[in-house]
Amino acid sequence: MTTKEYQEAVDWLFVQAPNYQIDGEKAYKPGLDNITKLCAFFDNPQEKIKCIHIGGTNGKGSTSNMLASILQEAGYKVGIYNSPHLIDFTERIKVNGENCDKEFVFNFIQKLKTLPEDILPSFFEFTTIMAFEYFYQQQVDFAIIEVGLGGRLDSTNIIKPMVSAITNVQLDHQNILGNTIEEIAYEKAGIIKSNITIISGDENETVKNIIRDKAKKENANFIDATSIKSDLKSDLKGNYQQKNIRVVLALTDELTRLNVEISHQDIESGLLNVNQNTGFIGRWFEFSKTPLTICDTAHNQAGLEQVFSQLNSIDRHKHVILGFVNDKKIDEVMNLLPENSKFYFAKPAIHRGRHPKDYEDLLINAKIIYKIFDSVQEAYLSAKQECTNDEMIFIGGSNFVVGEFLEKNLSVKE
């Protein structure tokens, strides 16, 4: 298999299977019927691995990777399934921080062409079974599975995990999951299964009660991670990580109760070496010190509130590069924009990317200093030219903006 053959196979997969990343809502295929048939076709690899299920609106990726890092420090072989990827497709499926083998991906995509006609998987369904099969073949000790969208009808919900967690519930994907926190919490709580402990990291009492009530119906132990007190730190530097750390500590407590050997030293070292152990980047990621350049994939109102709050705490003039996809409620973002900033709005280079000219009326009304660009890289080069060493650059607004920036510039930096 050549590099060209691999890329052609991945490109073919993106085109063939309905893909939420590209097409948005119309590619979303709720329900477990299709993934059930798909897993059965591949002899149900998800039943042969020990899984941990992580759901929630924000913090799933950080929580998953912190937990993976701790388990790796404890000597375990750990698979982790995250989405979306930032640079390369293989980032979605990792074992001990190593991206999925490209030869495996290539060969597995060929099997898509041999599926029975009654199984027409979405892109996410196919990558989910790919992850299950890879983790089974790699004989991982644990597979940490991140929910794709929602929970109740998400294709990852076919697993029977050792323990599950819901990091938090915020308004996001309302066009699919519901227009209220209560409706979205109900969907997220759908990952709760009979007699399997559920950990909640949300501070909202309404959300907490919805998760607790579902746990009670399923006879599942409910753990409120917000009651955990800890001063442990992580190399993931966003202020919001303290909330995720509490969920991770609740997860390690439950795994210990299930006779998984994890020491306090494993927890400390794991939290401090997430990037090294798992290769996880994109969350308050310091791309450079001179000038200070930070990336963060926060893309909904709750996530951006926290990130922009942290930006406001930094006493520097800021050059802020932002881009959004079509279904984003940009008027909500306008009310959150960080102070003391010049803005560079760019169109993400994907089908769903929204050109800033489409929402320029909102920029004018916001009375901010801004420029508009056709690409993220053009915006970055402009900001870099204008930014002095005592100022800073921030890149965010979407996974796709951060991914596009890193793809263009990370290899150059290295």
Image: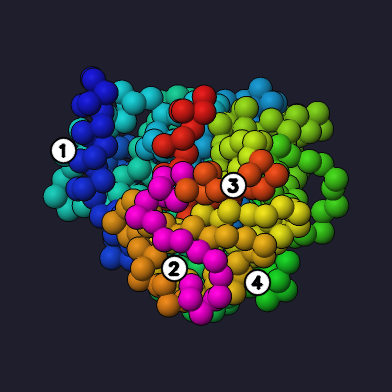
Which amino acid, mark 2? Lys
Which badge, 2 or 4, is on the more N-terminal residue?
4
Q: Position of residue 37 (x, y in %)?
A: 28, 49
Tell me how far mark 2 sits from mark 4, CA to CA.
23 Å
Circle 1 SS class? loop
Q: Residue at x 58, y 53 (%)?
A: 319
The residue singled out by tag 2 in the image is: 328
Look at the image and say whether residue 373 sits in the magenta stretch: yes
Q: Position of residue 80 (x, y in %)?
A: 52, 37
Which badge, 3 or 2, is on the more N-terminal residue?
2
Question: Which image quadrant: the N terminus?
Answer: top left
Residue sitting nearer the eye, 201 or 116: 201
Mark 3 or 2, which is nearer the eye? Answer: 3
The residue singled out by tag 3 in the image is: 387
Which badge, 4 or 1, is on the more N-terminal residue?
1
Q: Residue at x 63, y 40 (%)?
A: 291
The residue singled out by tag 4 in the image is: 207
Residue 232, by quadrant, is top right
Residue sitting nearer the eye, 414 or 231: 414
Which amino acid, mark 1? Thr
